[in-house]
Amino acid sequence: MTRLLTSREAQLGVAILVMIALIAVRFPAFVAPANLANVFNDTSALIILALAQMAVILTKCIDLSIAATLALCGMVAAMMNVAGVPLAAIIPLVILLGAGLGAVNGLLVWKLDIPPIVVTLGTMTIYRGVIFLISGGKWINDQQMSAAFKSFPRADFLFLPVLSWTAILVVVVFAVLIGRTPLGRSFFAVGGNPHAAVYTGINVGRTQFLAFVISGALAGLTGYLWVARYAVAYVDIAGGFELDVVAACVIGGISIAGGAGSVGGAVLGALFLGVIKNALPVIGISPFWQMAISGTAIILAIAVNASQGRTKGRVILKSAEHVA
Amino acid sequence: MQAPSIPPETPVLRLSGIAKSFPGVRALSGVSLELHAGEVTALVGENGAGKSTMVKILTGIYQPDSGTIAVDGVETRFPTASAAAEAGVTAIHQETVLFDELTVAENIFLGHAPRTRFGLIDRAAMLREARALLARIGAELDPAIRLRDLGIANKHLVAIARALSIDARVVIMDEPTAALSYKEIEELYDLVARLKAEGKAILFISHKFDEIFRIADRWTVFRDGELVGAGHMRDVTEGQLVQMMVGRPVDQIFPKRQHSLGAPVLTVAGYSHATEFEDINFTLHRGEILGFYGLVGAGRSEFMQALFGITRPSKGACRVGDRVVVIRSTAEAIAQGIVYVPEDRGRQGAVKGLPIYQNVTLPSLRRTSRHGFLRLAQEFALAREYTERLDLRAASLDQDVGLLSGGNQQKVVIAKWLAMKPRVIILDEPTKGIDIGSKAAVHEFMAELAAQGLAVIMVSSEIPEVLGMSDRVIVMREGRMVAEFAKDRMTPERLVRAAAGLADTTGAAA
Amino acid sequence: MSLSDTPHARHIPDRLASPLSRALKRWEVLLFLVAAAIFVINSFASPYFLDPWSLSDATYNFTEKAMIGFAMALLIIAGEIDLSVASIMALTSTAMGFAVTLGAGTPELVAIGIVVGLACGAFNGMLVAGMGLPSIVVTIGTMSLFRGISYIVLGDKAYNGYPASFAYFGQGYVWWVFSFELALFAVAALVFGVLLHRTNFGRAIYVIGNNPVAALFSGIRVARVKFILFLLTGVMSGIASICLTSRLGSTRPSIALGTELEAVTMVVLGGVNILGGSGTIPGVVLAALVMGLVTFGFGLLNVPGIVMSIFIGLLLIGVIALPRLWARARRRR
């Protein structure tokens, strides 16, 4: 019970609720169900990518190319739409493309043993550059996209748009993947103790590769959703979004050193940022404040993580056992 | 390679003609090893003899360059760790290799958990089976708690439960008692007996002869990557095994020393720490070797690290010479002439990746440099002086310390501190895990240092070493000093009883 | 089994390989050849390339980034990283722009640039070295925070109106075609090279990068060294910001966006191990030249900037991947 209350998820959940309550005192409209649903919908992309990033971070890697992958897949989706490819084909194709881009990251990490931060720093600029090459630097805008392409993520279904339902579906799938499948458990093993993972018959590189593929596939899916929702595709969409994604993970208590974290934490970390982002205009603060606020949130989150995780040294003295 | 004849009894696992090389190093050349069901085979050899490489080949981590592996007489290969596990070979390692963030049950079943109809992990079944396995080895652990909440001995039990869970036929134990306390070691021996009774073939790697003679049925000795011999324990003596290991007769004689104490150098009064140790008092003299004996986890290293400024005491005073000093950092301890050779050589001692000479001059840079600028000639001269005094074996002073054997790494770390011309040197388990040849060299050198007037503190868990080297010994238990013996009053029995908290029946506490 | 067991190797030589053979195996030699090749290719590709003035212009492609790169190299060798450098530049530039509106002159602006850089570095250093937090996430946080403050101050506006004399730092020439920035780059390379390779402080950086625990157990004040390295990185970011602001003559909150990636790329390309423990300043200097020459060459060929960034990305991965592929191919044979 005490563990439950001191857990990162509980603290974060309470923090979000307190934040919403404080806003509601002055601006009751913020807690109207329709608005909260809107906040959730607006945070859906961040939730999906935070989970994708979590899989990678759990295995002691990091995917800085996640937003570039999103943008490239989004552009390809838009171009396929312009070329007349049906939506039913576009969605699986961009997921596949995203998985392929993730596989490139994963292979470089797995087969050539290049540090993930270097690999994804490189592919991040490469993938953005490729968008420029295939699009010629031009925008694909509202008018060029078909109605079906644009309306799918916005379509309402059981009180929520498809975009929100996609996020919920990804959360459920992840909860099962992380908690109940051998692959999910091996993410923790690989990140927590790579040396030992080898001895338990887990292929560390292959597991990291799969995490990158999952991350890429979800970024691909989100690429379509993003482009369709905002009805525009160009080189710089979701620029810098990878930082928001990492921030959501860090705030959600996912250890950057790998091997520790939870699905609930990642989701709450994303919601925390999403609520702040949506609350700022409501309480009359310029959106220019958002960047500094999320930066501060990241720093506070790491400081809190560290103070909780700090090893207090060995307890050897009998007399000290009750204190510690 | 052809099998010359059918042996009377087919071993569970037989490796023959195994060779393995790494760039520049021949780790194994044509060695053989047989493991039999229901028997414990001790694998003995100095550090660098090729034991670890053998374990890695057995568990599918490394592939041999040549040679054959046969399970029940059928030739096979272990291309991956999983393949070895499927063949029933499992290892319990020196450092416990498990996962802190996973539960006990998940650690036991990682990679082969029971599944539900949908292919998902069946948690209920996993917990049930884990509980049954833990009961089988007599461990009272909740399989649902996370591993990080367990102590090292319990982690070992989880590792053993894991070995049982994959229905291992061959269990490799790589120095399993190195980090365990006396009582935990006894429990481990019981467990080995139980595994034997279940018909497992056990490979037991150890440096401790008493335990080899106690639990092993067969022996195999490696030296320099070659097989020296193998046979039944009943046909061999300790002396013969040692001789095979080192290739020359070795008598465990410690250097003779003139016992003459000088002036007090270091006085510690009432040193205490919130959780680690309490009320430590002693005076150390010039030319003295003061032993600190106790079980692993008695707080000896923790106290030494406080004395060296890594952690800070909550109470207590420290006098160096005539002056009361407060040590708040390692730099301040070094400035007072107190230096510390840590137990964890790889992590805290040697800076692998940097050359030998830079390791040696590290704390002495102030002396070899001018106005903060390096002077390489001075560095090489200093490094040469001390490494040659310690009889270091290395290709050049520019060689990466990480490429040296454990014993030679230890010499580099000791050389580093001697170059500082310290007043007090603290050696924490100075010969742990190093080969017998280097061991004797370190002992001889300690005696020489004391003779030159240095004050030496030696933390050791090896009773022969404590008895052979110390002028005086302090025994610690649960963070406190529980006994102190002068040279003429030290006996193995007294040390063990004091460390274990048993009443001294010999009536000799000092 | 190993060399160390050779009986009675009493005398230990200082070094085995001759200085020449060691030098030839170095990463820097490869980089130098790459730089030379690009130089030759460029001079064939465009007749304008060998013009001293256009070459001089080309140096602006790397001078500011390299100034940060030198400090970043030290930080990465010590096992840390600072991803907030571009944001420090933005915040510094914003502070200078704000000071201009209050009527500050050039000396004040320079002082402000250095002090703000120092303060940002101190903040990072306090969090990483003081509190023991992981630098990669800390500086992702301060990356948002520092630039975020610029956005709060500036929003979608810009600061202009820098005094005329301020233009010297980014646009002035010391002698003939040699710009002030190029001179500053050379001085910084020299200072950081000496600091890293010739001083006790530099040795401490390598020790910490290879084994921070053993460094602590050897009496090195690890936290203090790391703190100083963050300070240095902050100051160099401030100085780079002075140059960039002076060159552009205006400040927007998006100034220097993405510079941290280019600085890290330069450092890694220069042969610094991203995991810490090894690397040299001459390597970073050569990497700066390679990146500058490539950017300049592409510019002459009218290749857009974003395509150059593909090349930089490929270069970053390629320089690490190729030696590994090569080693693997050789092992197979």
Image (cartoon, rainbow, N blue to C red):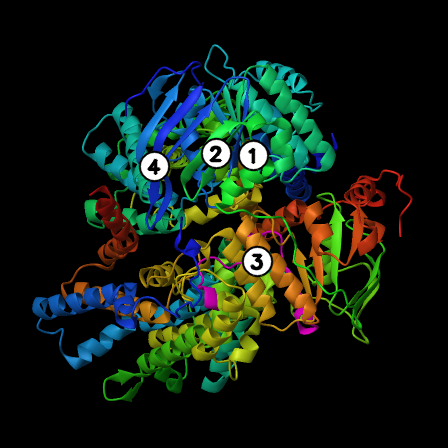
- Location of residue B95 in the rendering, given as x and y in whole percent from the top left corner: 57, 39
Figure check: B364 above or below A198: below
Q: Chain of mark 1?
A: B
The quadrant of the image that shows the N terminus of chain A is: top right
Q: Whole-Å distance between the Cαs marked 2 and 3?
A: 38 Å
Do marks 3 and 4 both belong to one polypeptide chain? yes
Indicate which disc residue C275 carries.
none
Tell me which segment is drawn in magenta: B332-357
Indicate which disc residue A197 carries.
2
Q: Whole-Å distance between the Cαs marked 4 and 2?
A: 26 Å
Residue extending farthest to the top is B117
Nearest the viewer among B176 and A237 is B176
What SS does tag 2 mark? helix
Any part of residue C131 in sight: no
The quadrant of the image that shows the C terminus of chain A is: top right
* Labels 2 & 1 near each other (Cβ < 8 A): yes
Q: Whole-Å distance between the Cαs marked 2 and 1?
A: 8 Å
Of badges 4 and 2, nearer the viewer stands: 4
Amino acid of disc 2:
Ala
**Disc 3 designates what residue?**
B441
What SS does tag 1 mark? loop
Q: Whole-Å distance between the Cαs marked 4 and 1?
A: 32 Å
**Disc 1 designates what residue?**
B99
Within-10-Å neighbours for mark 3: few <14, some 14–19, many 20+: some
- Location of residue B264 in the rendering, given as x and y in whole percent from the top left corner: 80, 71
Of badges 3 and 4, nearer the viewer stands: 3
